[in-house]
Amino acid sequence: ARLLLLHGPNLNLLGTREPEIYGATTLDEINREARRLCEDAGHQLETFQSNSEGALVDRVQAAREEGIAFIVINPAAYTHTSVALRDALAAVAIPFIELHLSNPHAREAFRHRSYLSDLARGVICGFGAHSYTLALQAALQQLAAAPQNP
Ligand code: DQA
């Protein structure tokens, strides 16, 4: 199957962005490791990062046409603001996992609310770059358990 890994705004700066919060791993390294995990399991991974809400909405909409079976998304700041991204994920009805490098619940109050979490299969946060590995492993497990994309 094909999976899609989506990265929201400012995640292109990973490696240099507030490393005390987000760590030293770059987005390229995260994408490479994620692709390896999926290919080892016999699946394909697409990756996409944008700083623009509309581009992320467009990418989610296109995922349905492409037959993407599962989405893993770090919505970054749009987690806390984007009804549009929520509506796009609801519209395409592709199962997804939300993830964060940091633990937003241990940070400012405005990070405690997510517009996506209640629609997600599950949420992983707080493990730095390892959050991506955990989220991909969970996605692969979900696909193995229900390959028909329920
Ligand atoms: C983040 C957490 C968000 O609150 C923040 O806006 C980000 C990154 C994370 O991965 O920890 O940009 O999603």
Image (spheres, rainbow, N blue to C red):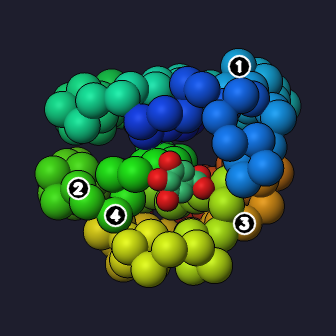
Q: Residues under labels 2 and 4: Cα distance?
A: 6 Å
- Residue 147 visible, this orientation: no
Read off the residue under disc 3.
126
Read off the residue under disc 4.
80
Q: Residues under labels 3 and 4: Cα distance?
A: 16 Å
Q: How crowded is mark 4: few (under 14 residues within 10 Å), some or many (20 or more)?
A: some
Secondary structure under tag 2 reads: loop
Q: Is residue 20 left or right of residue 96?
A: right
Q: Residues within 10 Å of mark 1 (few under 14, many from 20)?
A: few
Distance from mark 3 CB to nearest ligand 1 atom below 8 Å: no
Q: Residues under labels 2 and 1: Cα distance?
A: 25 Å
| Residue occupying image coordinates x 71% and y 28% | 16
Read off the residue under disc 1.
28
Q: Which of the pair 68/90 is nearer the observer?
A: 90
- Kind of residue indicated by mark 1: Asp
| Residue occupying image coordinates x 57% and y 79% | 105
Q: Quadrant of the C terminus?
A: bottom left
Distance from mark 4 CB to nearest ligand 1 atom below 8 Å: yes
Distance from mark 1 CB to nearest ligand 1 atom below 8 Å: no
Decide: marks 1, 3 in contact (CB < 8 A)?
Answer: no
Decide: marks 2, 4 in contact (CB < 8 A)?
Answer: no
Q: Residues under labels 1 and 4: Cα distance?
A: 25 Å
Secondary structure under tag 1 reads: helix
- Quadrant in the rendering for residue 144: bottom right
- Kind of residue indicated by mark 3: Gly
Q: Residues under labels 1 and 3: Cα distance?
A: 20 Å
Read off the residue under disc 2.
82
- Quadrant in the rendering for residue 30: top right
